Structure formats: C-alpha cells, structure tokens
C-alpha cells in the first residue's frame, strides 16, 4: 500500500488516497504551523502521491483555508486535488468564545440553508476556487431537519458548487436517515462519514459502521492516533510536556484510562515485534479495517508526515491483528449484542449464516 494505492470513497466515483492530509495545524494556534512549515508539509504530501486535502472554515479562524488555497494555486494542483472543507460551527466569532459569552449570530452556524450558503461562499473565497470536491457537515446541530440538510446539499451538488458531500460527528441514525431520504427521493446523498476512530475509540463500530455500510458511505477516521496517545510518547505517570494531550486540548485527560494503557501496551508489543514505531502500527491497524475509506492524519512538521505515510506499507499479520483486537475490542453494548454470532445462531437454529453485508 502507498498514497497512490487509491480507493473509491464510499459508493461513489470519488478516488482518494488512503491517507488524507488534515490541515487543522495550518495557521496560528496551539498546534499550528507557520506558513513555511505548512507549505513544506503540503509539498511533502503531494510528493508522496497524496491527493486528498481536508480543512474547515473554523481552522485557525479561516487561515487554514487561505493557506491551502494558496498552496494549491502555487502548484497548479486544483484538478489533481480532492479538496474538502466543512461547515456548521459558528462563523461569527470564535465558536467557543461565542458560546461562553452567549453572543454571536445564530444564523452563522448550524446546518440550515441560510448558513450553508453563507459558509460555502466564504470558504470558496478563502480557498480561491469555484467548487469544493467534498463538503462536510462538521457536526449536526440537533435542530435542522435532516430533510432540509439533504435538500440544501443536494441542490449545491446539482448547481456544481460542490461535487459530493459527507457527514461528520453525528448520531448514526442521522446519517442513516440522510442516506435513506436521498435514496428514496433519488437525489444526491452523503458518500462518507467522518468519526473519531482508533484502537482506543472503537465504539462507533456498533452503530456508525453498519449505518455507513448500508448507506454507501465510506468511513473516514479522524484522530487515528487518539490525539497522540498512540504515538508512543506517553507513559503512565509521565505525561506532562509530552505533546498535545499534556496541555489544554479537546480530549482533556480522557485518553489516560487503565483500559487505554493496556491497549497501548499491546500496540508497543507489536511495534517491538516488527521493529516499527508505535504510531505506524496504530495507523496500519486503522487502514486495515473494513469500511475505512481514507484515514485523516495531521502533521505540524514534515518528519511526522513521513512517519505516518510509512504506515501505509506496514502489513499486520493475522496474529498481530488478533492481539490488537483482543486488547481493544470494546465491551459489547446493546446494538453489538443483538448482532453477535451467538444471537444469529439462535435465530438460525444453530447455523452460522453469512449475510451479504458481513
């Protein structure tokens, strides 16, 4: 496998690299890279054959989109790049600051038609392009009817302002409903579902993976290294100053659990067996999972990117996959229990029946 071992994203004709370059690190911020460094990361990704760039309207206050647009234009890459960006978080100010202060234009956020058009027009200006290849709803707002979302985004596909759209960070039932509405109305539907997924975040396998498979959506994992927890830099009782998780961050200290430390030990065992970095093993496991279309990676320096790309050539054998699965399989919840092999054998008189989607 390599960055040119392309794959279709979901049930679509959109062809993408197995690793997508996330650009949340492009621009000012706690984990930001200056313009020269961001350009070097972008150039290294393209030199390796990667074609999938992911950004969002709120990353670095819009600076990430501006930098991505500049790099694409400088290299003349537009036709070769699958360019994706996102909408939904409030664009009237810093989303978190606006929420804490209780102010900001409510129609500058969410998935209503008014905001989608506002956000898309602003992203097109910052990116310096006439269309977006893959437009993501960054998060469901819990208010806008799914019918309105499908209609608005489908109309944008028809108008040529976006080529495809995807759904990020929302309940599985919302994604399933969107795909169903689109199929029944014979209108453009979502082709991908972006969720947190890694060896320490496998709960989405119970509902989101089946919803994506049934709706023709490819899974696009974000944070496959769990915010750096699976990079090998952290040790029990020694986390201060080690990376993103040691300071203020979206995950807090949620990754530092006894269960996750045990998973990390299993990853380290496989890494030792193979003589490869821990992060590459964690990425290789994610890439090997059924239903994964393209995995989102980020880098604030070229060395990080190069190490992540090297994971595409790492093959985990059955024994190593079994070891990692045994350590990381989450407790079976209600949905997982209902679809277990034991229940299926009870249904089919003791026989192991393979379904078409298995």
Image (cartoon, rainbow, N blue to C red):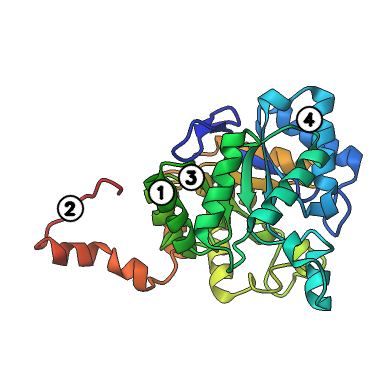
The part of the image, by quadrant, that contains residue 113 is: bottom right
Q: Which mark is residue 353?
A: 2
Count the numbered circles shown.
4
Q: CA distance from mark 2 to mark 4?
A: 50 Å
Q: Earlier in the sequence, mark 2 or mark 4?
A: 4
Give the image quarter of residue 105: bottom right
Say if mark 4 contacts mark 3, CB within 8 Å: no
The answer to whether 9 is drawn above or below residue 113 in the figure is above
Classify mark 1: residues with Cα within 10 Å, few (<14), some (14-19) or many (20+): many
Q: List the residue tagged with mark 3.
A: 189
Q: Earlier in the sequence, mark 1 or mark 2?
A: 1
The mark closer to the camera, 2 or 4, is 4
**Residue at point 12%, 60% (across, down):** 348
Label 4: few (<14), some or many (≥20) within 10 Å? many
Q: Position of residue 301 (x, y in %)?
A: 81, 44
Q: Residue 290's x, y, as percent?
A: 42, 46
Q: Nearer the viewer, mark 4 or mark 1?
A: 1
Q: Secondary structure at mark 2?
A: loop
> What residue is at 84 percent from the left and 77 percent from the top?
101
Closest to the camera, between mark 1 and mark 3, is 3
Q: Which mark is residue 72?
A: 4
Splitting the image into 4 quarters, where does residue 124 fall? top right
Between label 1 and label 2, give the one nearer the viewer.
1
Instruction: Decide which of tag 3 and tag 2 comes sooner along the chain.
Output: 3
Is residue 26 toward the left or the right of residue 140 in the image?
right
The image shows residue 62, relative to residue 80, as above or below, that is below
Earlier-in-chain disc, 1 versus 3: 3
Can see residue 238? yes
Q: Nearer the viewer, residue 136 or 269?
A: 136
Label 1: which secondary element = helix
Residue denoted by label 1: 215
């Amino acid at each position: 496998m390599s960055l040119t071992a392309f794959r279709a994203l979901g049930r679509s004709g959109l062809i993408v690299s197995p690793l997508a370059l996330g650009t949340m690190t492009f621009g000012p911020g706690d984990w930001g890279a200056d313009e020269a460094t961001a350009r070097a990361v972008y150039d290294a990704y393209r030199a390796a054959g990667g074609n999938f760039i992911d950004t969002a309207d709120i990353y670095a206050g819009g600076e990430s989109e501006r930098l991505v647009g500049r790099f694409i234009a400088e290299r003349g890459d537009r036709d070769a790049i699958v360019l994706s960006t996102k909408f939904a978080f409030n664009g009237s100010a810093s989303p978190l600051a606006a929420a804490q202060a209780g102010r900001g234009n409510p129609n500058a956020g969410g998935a209503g038609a008014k905001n989608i058009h506002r956000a898309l027009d602003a992203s097109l200006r910052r990116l310096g392009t006439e269309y977006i290849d893959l437009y993501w709803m960054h998060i469901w707002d819990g208010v806008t009817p799914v019918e309105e979302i499908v209609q608005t985004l489908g109309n944008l596909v028809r108008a040529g302002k976006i080529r495809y759209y995807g759904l990020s960070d929302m309940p599985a039932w919302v994604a399933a409903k969107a795909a169903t509405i689109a199929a029944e109305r014979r209108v453009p539907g979502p082709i991908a579902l972006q969720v947190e997924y890694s060896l320490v975040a496998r709960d989405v396998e119970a509902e989101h993976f089946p919803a994506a498979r049934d709706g023709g959506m490819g899974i696009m994992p974000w944070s496959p290294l769990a915010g750096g927890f699976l990079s090998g830099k952290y040790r029990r009782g020694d986390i201060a100053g080690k990376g993103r998780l040691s300071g203020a961050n979206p995950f807090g200290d949620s990754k530092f659990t006894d269960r996750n430390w045990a998973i990390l030990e299993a990853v380290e065992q496989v890494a030792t067996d193979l003589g490869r970095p821990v992060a590459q093993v964690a990425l290789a496991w994610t890439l090997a999972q059924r239903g994964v279309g393209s995995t989102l990676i980020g880098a604030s320096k070229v060395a990080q990117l190069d190490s992540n790309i090297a994971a595409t050539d790492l093959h985990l054998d059955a024994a190593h996959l079994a070891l990692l699965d045994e350590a990381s399989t989450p407790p079976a919840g209600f949905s997982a229990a209902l679809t277990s092999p034991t229940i299926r054998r009870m249904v089919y008189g003791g026989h192991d029946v393979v379904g078409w989607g298995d």
